[in-house]
Amino acid sequence: MFKGFTNRTDEFFMAIRFNNNAQFFHENHDWYDEAVRQPLKALAADLGPAVELLDPTLERRPERAVSRINRDIRFSNDKSPYRDYMWIGFHRPRPERSGTLGVYFDISAEGSSYGMGIYDENRPLMNGLRRQLASDARPFLEAARPALAEFALYGRSFKRMKIPPSVPEEARAWYPLRGFWVEKDLSRAQISSHALVEEITRGIELFTPLYRYIAGIEPVDDLGAI
């Protein structure tokens, strides 16, 4: 059972930031395991039932859902071997998970947040959303309303994409998005006890209509077909 993150969690993230090398990590592996990885795995396990209700196809096994602290430095100018943050990601098992719809929680020394969405570009799915927004945005806006009451919308947009006049004002921010995520910040008090499970479970209930609406969209490969 998840019991909360402690000050030792923040302290580890700060320590690995300033001592980002294999010797420090291996000497302090017990600290990492006790303060970071085990609480993340416990949180992932406790969230499993809520995630299953949302979408039973999402990968819920904690050992798969919790990120690795090791960075892939093969193609990066930054050769730091370890991250100073971690996350839980519930996605369908696919090679390019960052372009698929999912649920996440992230934590670092700076703070924590959770939400759902598509982090990287998924043009066919977003083209499908654009087609529906231009045709009749009302069902989408109804599905999105509970989530947007508490979660903020983020995403990268096409800068010069023309928005059809049929798209209502409430939906215009969504139309040019390459991908999106709706996210909510968490306080230190919220992540320090089992109440975090209750908070994220409630949040999942709020964004369930939006998630299911997006998941049910028919992808459109050619933007010109809209």
Image: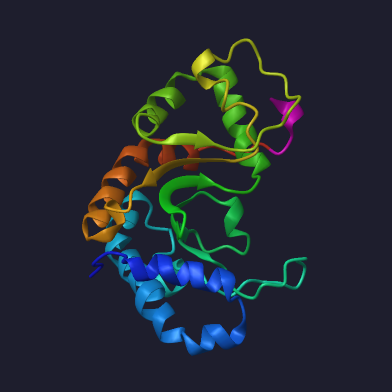
Image position, residue 153 (x, y; %): 49, 34
Q: Which residues are magenta?
A: 221-226
Residue at left 55%, top 84%? 24
Instruction: Say which quadrant the C terminus sits in.
Output: top right
Q: Quadrant of residue 65?
A: bottom left
The reply to whether residue 61 is in sight is no
Name the outermost residue toward the top.
Answer: 165
Residue at left 33%, top 70%? 39
Instruction: Say which quadrant the N terminus sits in.
Output: bottom left
Q: Is residue 159 left or right of residue 101?
A: right
> Does residue 103 sit above or below 65 in this rendering?
above
Image position, residue 88 (x, y; %): 44, 62
Residue at left 50%, top 45%? 117
Q: Is residue 16 magenta?
A: no
Q: Quadrant of residue 125?
A: top right
Q: Which sits in the foreground, 35 or 63?
A: 35
> Does residue 187 sit above or below 160 in this rendering?
below
